[in-house]
Amino acid sequence: MKKYRFPVIIAFAIATVVAVIGCFRLNFSFDFQQFFPRGDEDLAFFLEFIEEFEGDDNFMLVALEEPEGIFDSTFLNKAHDFALSTRNLAQVEAVQSLTQFGYPVKTPFGITTIPAIHRNQPELFEQDRERLMQDERFVGNLINEDATALVIAIKTPSLINLDQSRELMTGLEGLAADYDFHDVHYLGPAYFQQEMVDMQIREVTVSALVSGLLVALIMFLIFRRPLGIIVALVSIGLGLLLFMGLLGIAGRELNAIAALYPVLMIIVGTSDVIHIMSKYIDELRGGADKESAIKTTIREIGLATLFTSITTAIGFATLITSKINPIRDFGINAAIGVMVAYVTVLLFTTSLLSFLSVDQIVKIGRQQKFWDRLLESAYQFTRRSPGMIKIGAGLVLLLCVLGISMITTNYRIESNLPKGEKITADFLYFERELAGFRPLELAVVTKGENRVDDFAVMQEIGELEDYLREKPFIQGTASITAVYRSINQMFNNNRPDAYVLPSDSITFKRYRQLAQKVPQLSTGILMNPDRTKARITNRLGDLGADSIKVFMTNTEAWIEQNIDSSLVEVKQTGTGLIIDKNAEYIRASLLQGLGLAVVIVCGLMALLFRSMKMLLISLVPNLFPLLIAGAAIGFLGIELEAGVSIVFAVIFGIAVDDTIHFLSKYKLARDKGLPVEEAIHLTFKETGKAIVLTSLVLFFGFLVMLFSIHPPSVTIGLLISLTLASAVVSDLLLIPLLLKWLD
């Protein structure tokens, strides 16, 4: 260490400068396409589908609220002027509002239009209101049922990126500020993207600051010496900085789960630091000189910490089995982060420690006696009450089975939105007052020589639409039939009850001649150019993934019984379906990933301890935290979705660390010739304190996530904290019993 400590410190100083530069290159991102499962057949169909049609993510809705009612000339003129002004904004391709819409009217001189709303003729407002509120095309889409909000529908680029989203939202919000509307609500992918990225940046910053303050407090309570506290904090902070800088330099995108990185790096680094520094202090207190103390620390704790870091990294790395990119990215990044923290502590921290004596690092006092008494009591409890421990473990196991049976994957968009923020209030406003956000797309594919605009095919599409309209949670239904329904309504004096398909083929063919004159812009999004596919687009309430799956199963059964399969095939598609399928993949990848992690960790344990008995002893106490996590999800009614699913990988990866430290110390004691009971007792005294301290850091470290405004982050923090607390109890109580039984 004397030979290499200065070069090591200089190397880390250079790496720090590079990492700072990398941090300025961090790239945050959010879009729903991130959550598309790779390699899914429905995704392949969807991507093919949107090549022929426009996607279902190319919109921005702006609801202009007027509590006294929108039928007011002043409000309507402002709304009309606002709608016209939005056409000039960047990323706006088209704009639609009721103030621009006109009903077609057939006259002896041809087809003309009359305004849907006579903005400057208040005497006609009652007539306009009565007609509009019976028109299913507009209620829920461009006007709410109480007529207190008018919606401006804006067409945007599909798959809009973050820079485009910011440009659009800056323009929209600036323009809305120029008008004195009572309230303005936004809904659309661009709005989600901007707000969720801003939330990620806030979450990463806040979690890093709060975690840093917490760790500083813990280090003060542990060491009580300025130099000891500084060495610990600099080591932990450096590990975090190097990791974030590495992500920036490598161009890794930070997605919706990125807020976990600072917490993860700080607590993993803290765990490594406490184990290394505790062992170094024990060696110095035992009479060893600094160089011998560092050598022993690196040889014993460095090796154990290497294995704990590898097992933790493996726990995260198994997330690459997921088909969902944000989870895969989190697993890869977190695995890299764990190893960065280990290398930093092993090289940098030990280099600094080699300069310091025990009195410079820690203040020995009553706190040491407190830990000695606590761990002695825990050891004596395992000796006196093995029966109670077995009964307790059995009861916990039964409760876990009950809780796991209650797990739901009924994922809802609302549960992923930040608490108390405008984006959430706006989302709920559209869910409550208008058609909502979640898209439901149905593709109708003709068979044989049939075409979409054939009379028989159009009747089948109309029948399916009518079935969907009967469902109270489905709104905004639209398809190519709207053109024919509108023409039929026009020929019947625009009566609301005439908005239906013609009932005979002769009338239909006459209408088709008119429909073919409608500009391609109007029909191209509802029927492909060769007329072999049509889309039925809907807006669905935020019911939850499982509830929607039940509805779609029932719909498929209805289609099989009522739609002529010789004419058309109906297939569900769209962004909503692809994201909802995550629930199925989460279940599969969760079990697959955990199984892989257990197998790999078993291999490492076998390599480390070279004993099947020790392998079994190491696994049993680490299965309990996983079961407790599953039970907590079930009992608390937490939806198992993409973010929450990573909890199990985190728990298994971290929980096994304490087991390795405990068994490594026990094995060293046994190798020195100590009998089982004495080896367990010595392990409690020498390793128990570091295990309890690191577990306390982990517990409070993940509780930092309670400060998050992102509900999944709060859930993740709470679950991991509670289950890792159970992990240390499991280690200290079950391992001694297993050792006495098997070793």
Image: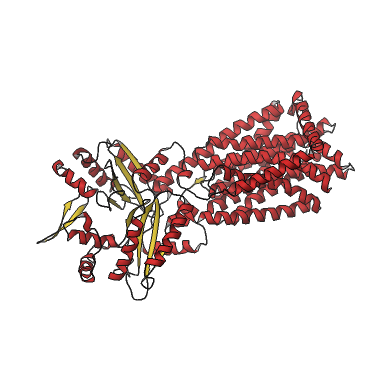
Residue 300 percent location from the top left of the image = 79, 42
- Is 522 or 226 nearer to us in this picture? 522
Residue 74 percent location from the top left of the image = 20, 38
* Residue 313 visible in the displayed image: yes
Q: Is residue 304 above or below residue 530?
A: above
In the image, 356: left or right of 82?
right
Question: How are the residues colored?
Answer: secondary structure
To which quarter of the image does residue 356 belong? top right
Give the residue displayed 81% in from the left and 45% down from the top: 739
Q: Exactly how many numbered labels are in the figure? A: 0
The furthest residue to the right: 673
The furthest residue to the bottom: 449
The furthest residue to the top: 366
Give the residue displayed 47% in from the left and 56% down from the top: 549
Residue 391 percent location from the top left of the image = 74, 42
In the image, 242: left or right of 279?
left
* Residue 336 visible in the displayed image: no
To which quarter of the image does residue 501 belong? bottom left
Residue 410 percent location from the top left of the image = 50, 50
In the image, 325: left or right of 194?
right
Question: In which quadrant is the N terminus drawn?
Answer: top right
